[in-house]
Image (cartoon, rainbow, N blue to C red):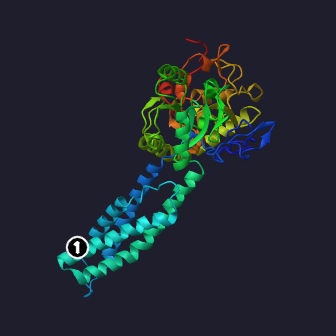
Amino acid sequence: MPSALAPPSTPTDRPTDADPRSDRPEGSIVSGVLLRRGPFRPVHLVPARARVEARSLARMFRAFDAAAIIGAAALLWLLARDVSGAPMGLAPFALSAAALLFGLHAFEAYDFAHREPLLRHMVRVLAALGFTALTVLLALRLTGRSPSGHLALKAWFAGILPLLIGLHAAWWTLIDRGRREGHLTPNVVLVGATANAERFIAAALKNREVNVLGIFDDRHGRSPGHLLGVPVLGDTSALVDHRIMPYVDRVVIAVTASAQGRIHQLMERLSVLPNTVCLFVDDDGVIAHAAVSQIADSALTELSGGPADSRRALVKRTQDLVLGGLGLLALTPLMLVVALAVRLDSPGPIFFRQRRHGFNNEEILVWKFRSMRHADADHTASRQISAGDDRVTRVGRFIRATSLDELPQLFNVLRGEMSLVGPRPHAIGMKTGEIESAKLVAQYAHRHRMKPGLTGWAAINGSRGPVDTPE
């Protein structure tokens, strides 16, 4: 039985031929079905919610470098002495720090280009250091402060060289590992097995800035089995419900410019997706490489999908981690009391686990304190709980009325599956009357364009309880 203090662990599912998390190599046969991974398919597929933009990390690295360089300059200034033993002036150290920060930017030490080896990246860093040395030497010669200035320069490079080399070796390693593990490289699927799709794939194969996981085409019976090794996985109807979609950052429509009617139909059909949908039209192949880079940087004009703002997402994730961690620490005694009350009130486990919709329709395992009798557990919410429901225990009524049953979802927040604030996650297969709730509203999945929340606008404004009628 898991402790109320221990983070719940998600059961490991065995990969199958239909499971996008499958680690089996391309060409393996499972249940008589040939697995088709394609040339881009990473060994481990990472959910879109866990994707991080490399340039966001680069901004963080740059800020960290600035703090380290300015701090090192200040420390060396405090410790340095000139030839007579007197303290040295601040100017050489301030100039060195400013020149180095400018040099790192000028020599593109924060670009972290795809496939750039560590040695080449270090050449950029050393070039920035060389630029700094030349700048400071020139300034010293012009000001006539050579003896003490040279001592300052030697002290500077003795201290900053190993620090900067170590930092950028760490930055390069983090970026490289993030790309290999799928945290930094966006995943896309293409709609349309067309010449444009082939150009897009060729450009992506060359620069490796995006992973093209598959192609969907309504002419599935007439389309080839693959384009440049990327498999055709079905038609657009299959795309909407495909299990790979929680791992997809963007759906790219790749059709000819003259097919305006088809573009309109595809836009209308795909507008129900929570995933971002964008358009790629390239009749001459000139902009293919630029388009791949734009998609990698989230700069293309989008047809549908939630707003993308990497800085706001980073701030929100930081907020979730800090406030969620502090909240868990502060509420642990209360959670222990609730766990004990649930255990003493009725037989069964302390926690209730239920698969619910997360970001981009991802299936997440949400944790709650059990409020119903264990024998009456309803994991698909086929019958929503109503007032006076006889399945709810005595303790369950209290913790549901006070929302204490939701506290274990702090673990979901810390894992990145949920946020502190957002639409409440609905159970997969939840019914409204006799109809599955997701089928009552055409754009139902739009609520999954953001992470579900521990609480949200509706919850604090009294919109709680069963959704038991279509209206």
Viewer can see residue 161:
yes
Neighbor class of circle 1 (other Cα within 10 Å; few <14, some 14-19, many 20+) is: some
Task: Name the quarter where the N terminus is drawn.
Answer: top right
Badge count: 1
- Give the farthest residue toward the front: 284
Look at 71% across and 43% down and name the residue there.
Answer: 22
In the image, residue 383 above or below residue 168: above
Q: Position of residue 142 (x, y in %)?
A: 18, 75
Q: Position of residue 72 (x, y in %)?
A: 37, 70
In the image, residue 176 above or below residue 444: below
Q: Secondary structure at mark 1?
A: helix
Task: Find disc 1 in the rendering and name its residue.
Answer: 139
From the viewer's side, name the closer residue of 20 and 124. 124
From the viewer's side, name the closer residue of 159 and 206. 206
Q: Position of residue 336 (x, y in %)?
A: 64, 43
Location of residue 345 by image quarter: top right
Describe residue 307's horizontal placement relative to residue 437 as left or right: left
Location of residue 341 by image quarter: top right
Q: Position of residue 233 (x, y in %)?
A: 66, 32
- Give the farthest residue toward the bottom: 84
Look at 23% across and 81% down and name the residue there.
Answer: 146
Location of residue 68 by image quarter: bottom left
Task: Name the quarter where the C terminus is drawn.
Answer: top right
Viewer can see residue 242:
no
In the image, residue 426 above or below residue 7: above
Q: Amino acid at mark 1?
A: Ala
